[in-house]
Image (tube, helix red, strand yellow):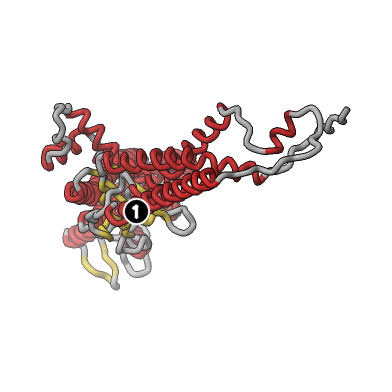
Amino acid sequence: MAEEPEEQTSEPFDLQRYLSVVRRRHIHFLIPLLVGWLAVWGASWVLPASFKSSTLILVEQPTMPKNYVVPNVSDDLQDRLQSITQQILSRTRLLLIIDKLHLYEGGRKRVAADEKVELMRKDIAIELVRDNHGEEITAFRINYSAHDPHIAQQVTSELTDLFINENLKVRQQESKDTTDFIASQLENARASLAEQEAKVREFEGQHEGALPSQQASNLQILAGLQAQLQNEQDALNTARQQRVFLQSEMEQYRASGHVPAQTADGAPTALTAIDQELATLRAKLGELNSAYTDSYPEVQSVKNQIASAEKRREKLIADLAQGGKGGSQPIGGTLARDNADAPMVQLRGQLEASRAEIANREQSIAGLKERINEYQARLNQAPVVEQQLADQTRGYEQSKADYDDLLKKSNESEMATNMEQMQQGERFSMLDPPSLPLKPDFPNRLKFCGIGLGVGLALGLVVVFGFEFLDDRLYSENEIKALLPVAILSELPEVQLPSDERHSMRIAAMGWSTAVLVVATIVAGSVFSYLHG
């Protein structure tokens, strides 16, 4: 018995077997290949052609440097471009273009307006162009596809104009809205500032004289008032001494009946007292004039006192003159009085004048003390007033800072708005005009040739595999040997008749002819698609 062949773990690649399959099934492969390619290639000529027109819009930066004029619109170009795209692709805008160019009206079926809008939105494509780093948008491309290349170009031109004009409109409107908003905030800040100013003025009016800014002048005035008080007290003491002296003179005169003592120059003592008072008042007036104007109340009071003292002096001199004319005659440079009551009258007049001066001095001292107390109260109240004023001015300063900041922003925003209205800001400019497509964008017939070739190859392989799978015949010696249970001891060579050789040659010739025909057809179709696609 012959030994059974050992099982092989892996079957080696049998080139002859596959070549045999090719020789047997080349027709089964070439015909599906041609059919699949023809189906796809023919579909590329049956499908309606779509032409794409495109244009490139450049994003130009503002002509004015940002250091001089700061734009007051959003810097996010992508968000703004998305907003503009949504506005342009709105139903109203697209229907205007559809009605103007009579789009989507060629078919038998009537298309609704909303369906036309959806079809047009699908035919529009926006492509962003970024810089080398992929961060900043430098341009964008508008594409529109239509069955007519001229229609595609016209629609692209309409969309380009809409994008350029809408960008200008949006930037100008945003800039104007920003300026108006800042202006309204500025008006509110101005009203708040005026309110704070009114509160500060009202507070300063209620605390006039006790404000921190008046503290130095209050101290100066207080020092002047204290000096005046000291002078008035000195003058009061002098007047009181004069009154005591006059009273003692009158008592001596009543007791002895002699003429009262006179001064060395012959003038009565009362006249000397008035002269001393005038000298004191004039010295005081000189001090006040060096620090204050003539309209100052203290200066006016001292002038009134000087005028009153001068009137009393003139009256006293007139009384003395009248007393001398009544019957006296000069003896040894002195006045001899014949009338015994004249000296007493003079002393009484001097005493009344002294009493009036004392009353005036006491009244003046009381007024000075009252004013000193007033200024001391102001100085004592100054810390509290200063704190309250600080609270008032804090709100004013904050309102003033807000107002100044808004005023600066308002001026900058107005400049930016003017720049946008003069079209000197960021704007869109058409770099490439809308193109007139010469070849359809869809279908790409050359690409369809490649797809058809792939489909044909797959279809041919499937057909060949199917025929091989269903065919149970044996075509090689190895297949026969694999089925026999024993080893073959000898083989007989194949004897071919002339008719068999001629049949094989016809089969081979037909196969090559079919292969040439299929390849030539595919090449010719691809070349035709390239030239006319």
Q: Indicate the position of residue 50 as horizontal and vertical percent values.
A: 26, 44
Q: Amino acid at mark 1?
A: Ala
| Few, some or many residues within 10 Å of mark 1 (<14, 14–19, 20+) | few
In this rendering, position of residue 432 left or right of residue 381: left
Q: Is residue 376 visible?
A: no
Q: Indicate the position of residue 141 as horizontal and vertical percent values.
A: 32, 51
- Under circle 1, the secondary element is helix
Given residues 373 and 17, the one toward you in this image is: 17
Q: Which residue is mark 1?
A: 524
Is 90 above or below relative to 238? above
In this rendering, position of residue 65 left or right of residue 435: right
Q: Indicate the position of residue 10 as horizontal and vertical percent values.
A: 76, 37
The residue at the far bottom in this view is: 332
Given residues 352 and 7, the one toward you in this image is: 7
In this rendering, position of residue 423 left or right of residue 27: left
Quarter placement of the N terminus: top right
Number of numbered discs: 1
Q: Indicate the position of residue 84 as horizontal and vertical percent values.
A: 28, 43
Is 58 above or below relative to 507? below
In this rendering, position of residue 459 left or right of residue 318: right
Residue beneath the point at 21% across and 66% down: 329
Given residues 253 and 363, the one toward you in this image is: 363
Given residues 110 and 10, the one toward you in this image is: 10
Residue beneath the point at 34% across and 43% down: 41
Is 116 above or below relative to 249? above
Residue beneath the point at 61% across and 42% down: 18
Q: Could you say which quadrant of the image residue 283 lies in?
A: bottom left
Q: Is residue 476 visible?
A: yes
